[in-house]
C-alpha cells in the first residue's frame, strides 16, 4: 500500500476507483487484530466514495479520524465510558476542511482516554496493538491512527499532540509525525484554551502526505483565537527549501531523558547521516532542558474537569486510573502554588529553548526514550534494565516517557518524528525540533532522510 498522494494519482489515472480503495480499507479493518478502529460509518463512506471528486487534494482517499476529533453524527466519546452514548452535532474545523478537500471519512481510530497518556488502552475499547508486534503499544494518544496507517488499514489519519501524541505513536510505528507550531491548524469550533500545548494534525507514511495535509488544513479561524494566518505552498515547497549551512545540535536525550543505548546509537547514526546529506553544520551547544512532566500533566487538569462537567465526581469509577488520578488531583490538590509552579516551568523552558535557538536552527534528538512497551502498559519505569525510580525518583521515572516530546508542546515549537530504523524489530524514531513557524524546513530535512534512507511505508505483513 502506498501513500495517500499516490492513491489520488491512481484515482486520477483511472487505475483504481475511490470505491475500490474504500472497500479495501473496510475489508482490512474487518480482518484486523489491531483494535485500532472503534467506529465505522460504512453507509456514509460508501456514499462519499461513489461521488468523490478526485480533482480535490484528498479526493476519494479513505481516512480515519481520531476519536477525540468531532465529526457530525459520529460518537463523541473522548475514548471514555463516561461519554460512550454521546454523539457530535458538529464537525471540527479540521475535519470540515478535510471533507471539503474530498476525503472519505471512514471511521474513528482509538485513542487514550481524553488523550491523557501515551498508551492506547481504555475501559471503553481495551488495548490497541502495534502492527510491528501485537503485544506492544502503538503509543498514544493517537495510537489507533498510527496503528491504522502503519498497519495498512487506512492510508492517512488525523492525530493530535499535546505532549507527544502524534510524534510518540509515529515513532513507535515507523511513521512520519509532524507537530506543527502551536496554532498552525485551528482547533474548534469549540476550542479548548488551556493548557496552550495541544495541536492537531496527522499520521502519515510520507513527507508529501503531511505537506498536502497542511495545505488543506492550515489557516486561521475565528473560532480559535490562537490560530495562525494561512501559509500556502507546503507540498509544492518540498524539495525546494534551502537548508545547506544551517546549524544543528545533536542532543539525543535533551539533557532530560534516559535513553536506551540501542536507541541512542541509532539516532546518533541517523543524525550524523542527515547532517552530511543535508549539508548542515553540526555545532556543540549545551542542551539541558528542564524536566517538567508533572507540571505538564497538572496544566491540563482544568480542561479535564471542564470536559467532565457536572458528571464528576459521580463518574469517577468509570475513568481509567490515570485520568481518575488527574481528576482527583485537580479537585483536591490543585492550588495557587501548583499554578505558580506550572507558570515558572513554562517561563523557564521557553527561555531555555529560545537561548538554544539563538545559536542553532535545529535540535536533533530521539523521539522516544526506548522502543514500544507492552500494549496494556503500565508506563515503563526502566530503561536498559535500570530502575529509574531508584535512580532518579518516581516523578522523573514516569516523566521519562514524555521528556523528549513535552518541551516542544510547552514552547509551541514545531517538531517532526522521522523513522530511522529498527531495534529488536521495533521502530526507532529521530525527532527534529525547529524554530517557531519553520515546519517547512523540518519537512525538508525529513524528505532528505526519506530519499537517502527510505523507510517502509507499512509494517511487515500489512495489507497491500
Image: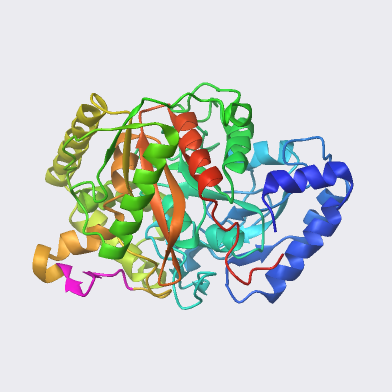
Q: Provide residue 192's location: percent of width, then percent of height.
A: 43, 40
Magenta span has 403? no
Q: How many marks?
A: 0
Depth check: give the residue in front, 7 or 123. Answer: 7
Query: At 43% from the left edge and 34% from the top edge, which residue is drawn?
Result: 278
From this view, report whether residue 404 is shown above or below residue 245. below
Q: Give the colour scheme shown.
A: rainbow
Q: Provide residue 246's location: percent of width, then percent of height.
A: 36, 26
Magenta span has 383? yes
Q: Which residues are magenta?
A: 378-388
In the picture, the quarter occupied by the C terminus is bottom right
Query: At 55% from the left edge and 43% from the top edge, which residue is drawn?
Result: 451
Q: Provide residue 12's location: percent of width, then percent of height.
A: 85, 41
From this view, report whether residue 76 is shown above or below residue 286. below
Depth check: give the residue in front, 332 or 385. Answer: 385
Please indicate whether residue 360 sits to the left or right of residue 377 in the image. left
Please indicate whether residue 373 sits to the left or right of residue 462 in the image. left
| Residue 33 visible from this viewpoint | yes
Quadrant assignment, res 280: top left
| Residue 164 visible from this viewpoint | no
In the picture, the quarter occupied by the N terminus is bottom right
Q: Provide residue 463's location: percent of width, then percent of height.
A: 69, 68
Query: At 19% from the left edge and 30% from the top edge, which residue is drawn?
Result: 351
Amino acid at each position: 500500500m502506498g501513500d495517500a498522494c499516490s492513491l489520488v494519482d491512481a484515482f486520477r489515472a483511472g487505475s483504481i476507483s475511490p470505491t475500490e480503495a474504500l472497500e479495501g480499507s473496510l475489508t482490512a479493518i474487518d480482518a484486523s487484530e489491531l483494535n485500532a478502529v472503534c467506529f465505522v460509518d460504512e453507509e456514509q463512506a460508501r456514499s462519499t466514495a461513489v461521488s468523490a471528486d478526485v480533482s480535490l487534494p484528498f479526493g476519494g482517499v479513505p481516512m480515519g479520524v481520531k476519536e477525540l476529533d468531532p465529526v457530525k453524527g459520529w460518537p463523541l466519546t473522548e475514548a471514555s465510558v463516561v461519554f460512550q452514548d454521546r454523539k457530535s452535532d458538529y464537525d471540527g474545523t479540521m475535519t470540515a476542511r478535510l471533507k471539503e478537500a474530498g476525503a472519505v471519512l471512514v471511521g474513528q481510530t482509538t485513542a487514550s482516554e481524553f488523550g491523557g497518556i501515551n498508551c492506547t488502552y481504555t475501559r471503553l475499547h481495551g488495548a490497541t496493538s502495534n502492527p510491528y508486534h501485537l503485544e506492544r503499544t502503538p503509543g498514544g494518544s493517537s495510537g489507533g491512527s498510527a496503528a491504522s496507517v502503519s498497519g495498512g488499514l487506512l492510508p492517512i489519519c488525523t492525530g493530535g499532540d499535546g505532549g507527544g501524541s502524534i510524534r510518540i505513536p509515529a515513532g513507535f510505528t515507523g511513521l512520519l509525525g509532524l507537530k506543527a507550531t502551536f496554532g498552525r491548524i485551528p482547533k474548534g469550533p469549540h476550542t479548548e484554551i488551556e493548557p496552550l500545548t495541544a495541536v492537531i494534525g496527522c499520521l502519515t507514511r510520507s513527507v508529501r502526505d503531511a505537506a498536502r495535509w497542511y495545505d488543506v488544513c492550515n489557516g486561521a479561524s475565528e473560532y480559535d483565537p490562537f490560530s495562525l494566518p494561512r501559509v500556502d505552498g507546503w507540498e509544492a515547497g518540498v524539495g525546494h527549501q534551502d537548508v545547506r549551512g544551517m546549524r544543528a545540535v545533536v542532543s539525543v536525550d535533551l539533557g532530560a531523558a534516559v535513553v536506551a543505548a540501542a536507541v541512542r546509537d541509532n539516532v546518533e547514526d541517523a543524525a550524523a547521516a542527515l547532517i552530511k546529506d543535508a549539508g548542515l553544520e553540526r555545532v556543540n551547544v549545551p542542551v539541558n532542558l528542564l524536566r517538567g512532566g508533572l507540571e505538564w500533566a497538572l496544566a491540563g487538569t482544568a480542561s479535564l474537569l471542564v470536559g467532565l462537567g457536572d458528571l464528576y465526581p459521580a463518574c469517577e469509577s468509570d475513568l481509567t486510573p490515570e485520568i481518575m488520578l488527574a481528576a482527583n488531583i485537580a479537585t483536591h490538590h490543585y492550588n495557587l502554588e501548583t499554578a505558580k509552579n506550572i507558570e515558572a516551568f513554562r517561563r523557564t523552558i521557553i527561555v531555555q529553548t529560545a537561548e538554544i535557538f539563538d545559536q542553532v536552527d535545529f535540535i536533533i534528538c530521539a523521539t522516544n526514550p526506548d522502543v514500544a512497551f507492552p500494549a496494556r502498559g503500565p508506563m515503563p519505569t526502566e530503561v536498559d534494565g535500570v530502575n529509574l525510580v531508584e535512580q532518579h525518583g518516581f516523578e522523573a521515572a514516569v516523566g521519562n516517557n514524555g521528556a523528549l516530546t513535552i518541551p516542544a508542546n510547552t514552547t509551541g515549537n514545531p517538531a517532526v518524528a522521522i523513522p530511522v530504523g529498527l531495534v529488536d524489530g521495533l521502530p526507532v524514531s529521530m525527532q527534529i525540533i525547529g524554530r517557531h513557524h519553520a515546519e517547512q524546513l523540518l519537512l525538508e530535512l525529513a524528505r532528505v532522510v526519506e530519499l537517502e534512507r527510505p523507510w517502509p511505508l507499512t509494517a511487515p505483513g500489512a495489507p497491500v
